[in-house]
Amino acid sequence: MSNRPTISLPQGVRDILPDEARKISEIESKVLPVFADNGFESIRTPMLEYVDVLSLGMGRGLQDQAIKFIDPSTARVVAMRPDTTAQIARVVATRMRKYPFPIKLCYNQSVVRYPGAQNSKSREIQQIGAEHFSTKTTPEADADMISMAIQSLKALGLKSFMVDIGDVAFLRTILDNLGVTEEEASDIKEAIAIKDSSELSILLEGSAISKADKELLIALTTFYGEGEVIERAKEMVKGSPAEAVLDNLSRVYSLVCERGHAENVTIDLGEVRGFDYYTGTIFEGFASGVGSAILSGGRYDNLLEQYGHSASATGFAFDVENIVAALDAQNS
């Protein structure tokens, strides 16, 4: 008598049945034309990459989330892609090296990740994303990407959503001027990320950081809201390198608002997501009815250098399943 296997799927992946598949197709049919209208061309990258090549463009967090195995034909370690941006950076730096800038590419494919040490289940995430490569960093390019993300969500008919805009260079510049240790900086970032002013006050007690800088760090837990947040922060960093960061962010915010998206954007100067990966403007989208982000992105000007080419870059990706959930919640 043969032992039949249990009919099941690996943890963290699932079948998508016709009703949800139709909803995903509708999202694709509405978002991708917005990308095309903004000059973005479609690209497809392979599911498998050599780990040592892929790791050039990924932080430690994503490297740890990659599902790896040995390729029997080469004995090299191969990974299922946990991220598409690094792959596109590789393509631009190698096969598209002679293409004129700007280069605008978009994609519609899945990534596979271990979500983290707390939960060993792998997860397949369907993403629709866009990457913009240029010769220099400009607030206009950042505003273009944020505006295109908002245009896409409006094209989907999503009624209630917000995009939080920040800049990791702001906190990085402040920390660099404080002369704190790497461990101290990590603790400060963690407290700011969860908006815990009490914990941050305790961390700063007895430190050699000046009173004014302590007040600035604590204020970062409250610097969330509309454009006046930037002006409040400017008063506290006047004359320092951090002021120039805020000038750039103010320009990005103004451009997005001028394009008719003021009601869908907020400023968050305490956002530290991707601190070691992003280099400037970052943004993240949320919708009512869904507890996690429906999109995330930002500027990553150092990535192409890892593949031997130099260019400024910014991009974002939608989490398609979360958008389906948001649309369902708002239309129910």
Image (spheres, helix red, strand yellow):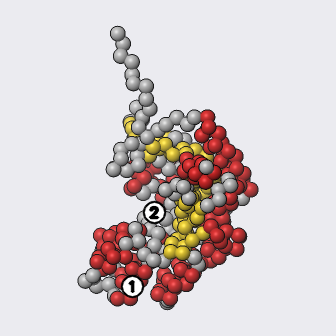
> What is the count of numbered marks?
2
Residue at horizontal 43 percent and vertical 25 percent from the top:
7
Above or below, 152 relative to 280: above
Side of 188 relative to 231 (left or right):
left
Give the x, y percent position of residue 9.
44, 32
Answer with the quarter of the image where residue 120 lies. Answer: top left
Which callout, 2 or 1, points to the residue nearer the camera? 1
In the rendered structure, which disc, 2 or 1, sits on the residue that comes first in sequence?
A: 1
Hey, what amino acid is under mark 2?
Answer: Gly
Which of the pair 93/129 is nearer the observer? 129
Residue labelled with disc 1 = 215
Q: Label 1, secondary structure: give it.
A: helix
Left/right of residue 257 with respect to residue 245 in the rendered view: right
Location of residue 285 with respect to 80 vertically, above or below: below
Q: Please state which amino acid type lies under the numbered disc 1.
A: Glu
Q: Which mark is residue 274?
A: 2
Q: Residue at x 52, y 57 (%)?
A: 293
Q: Say if residue 301 shows up in the picture.
A: no
The residue shown at (41%, 68%) is 193
Depth order, front residue of 78/168: 168
Q: Is residue 214 visible?
A: yes
Q: Is 138 placed above or below 114 here?
A: below
The answer to whether residue 79 is left or right of residue 103 is left
How far apart marks 2 and 1 lie (CA) works out to 24 Å
Furthest-left residue in this view: 206
Q: Which mark is residue 329?
A: none
- Label 1: few (<14), some or many (≥20) within 10 Å? some
Which residue corresponds to the image point at 72% horizontal and 59% vertical from the top-left? 38
Q: Nearer the viewer, residue 131 or 259?
A: 259
Please state the horizontal and vertical placement of residue 140, each as a whole percent of the image: 65, 71
At which x and y percent is residue 209?
A: 32, 84
